[in-house]
Amino acid sequence: MNSAELETAARALMQQKRLTLLGHSIPDGDCVGAVTALMWALANMGKDVNAIIEDGVPPTYRFLNGSERISSLIDLPPIYDCLVYLDCATRERVGERLSRLIPPAATVINIDHHISNQGYGTVNLVDAGASSTCEIVFYIIKRLNSPITIDIATSLYCGIVMDTGSFQYSNTSPRTHQIAAELLQYGVDMDLVRTRLFESKSRVEVSLQKTALDSLEFSKDGRIASMHLSYDDLTRLGAVDLHFEGTINMARSIEDVEVALLFREIEPGVIKIGFRSKQEVDVNRIAGVWGGGGHKRAAGATLRGELEAVKKVVLLKVEEHLP
């Protein structure tokens, strides 16, 4: 992200009176944080702005002020002629159902940090070197000269914390720490953030993690760890629509594991796959084989087929990429 690209994106936002912000389906903290923060900043500038996330906001992030203003398919608002995609590597990342309902727009602003982003906007602000989309949104708000309120700061801080694994992942840079430090100066309630993000798991989520761990399997050399959740598992636990993060990282945290995978059957014959790696394997390239993507160390893809058959195909491909 250079200064000219940032200026172009900021100018495009300033020129609009009505904007619709779009986050990706099964939203994570970076997505929700970026949407709420930019929504507040634009609204504080007097703009007519609405926001849509296909699945709505997960309970974990509903403590963020403004999250209640993010619509889902259940309460779809008007979709304006300026679309701002946040944290979406592709247009389709907003979700199959929502993407079918979005009409063509005169202005499409694409704000993202995924290396697999296709540059689909009329204006593209994509920085694969940023820790998170929230990091990019921080600079946009600064360029807009919109004040950073405590609500904006909290949203941005949460997004950065979640996408950096609490500043543990390799996408954390000195710039990331500098931004986080400045956001804390705006009065972010650290106790609230810690409690809501890391100490408020539902019993269903814990049961889901237990079920995933019960399925844990390793490759012969121990460098690949995989877990799976069948559709029967998800329905039995009442977790088909549960938005959860972190389960896959339990497998990646195991000694000698380089690549961790989580296979999740979200509906019969539809398997979502999460890929994580530690140091050597570019999982973005592997996910790209099936039209997925993300980052070098974290990516995802969706395949259709029987769960065990999908697992076999994907695990073989991962083995091919091990150095």
Image: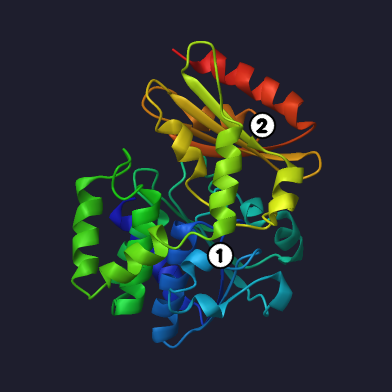
- Residue lying farthest to the bottom in this orientation: 46
Looking at the image, how many numbered discs can be counted on the residues?
Answer: 2
Q: Quadrant of the C terminus?
A: top left
Q: First in sequence, mark 2 or 1: give its number.
A: 1
Mark 2 nearby-residue class (10 Å; few <14, some 14–19, many ≥20): few
Identify residue type, mark 1.
Answer: Pro
The disc at residue 290 is 2
Q: Secondary structure at mark 1?
A: loop
Residue 20 on image: x %, y %: 58, 73
Residue 144 appears left or right of 115: left
* Residue count near mark 1 (Cα–Cα under 10 Å), binned few <14, some 14–19, many ≥20: some
The amino acid sitting under disc 2 is Trp
Q: Is residue 22 left or right of residue 132?
A: right
**Mark 2: secondary structure:** loop
Name the residue located 22 percent from the left edge and 68 percent from the top edge: 184
Q: Which label sits in the foreground, 2 or 1? A: 1
Residue at image mark 1:
58
* Residue 98 in the image, given as x and y percentages of width and height: 71, 62
Q: Is residue 93 above or below residue 41?
A: above
- Asked if residue 266 shows in the view, the reply is no
The answer to whether the residue labelled 2 contacts the one labelled 1, judged by CB atoms less than 8 Å apart, is no
Whole-angstrom CA distance, mark 2 to mark 1, is 27 Å
Figure quadrant of residue 233: top right
| Residue positioned 70% across, 57% down in the render | 238
Give the image location of residue 14, x and y in percent: 42, 76
Q: Say which residue appears at 44% left-offset and 83% top-offset.
A: 43
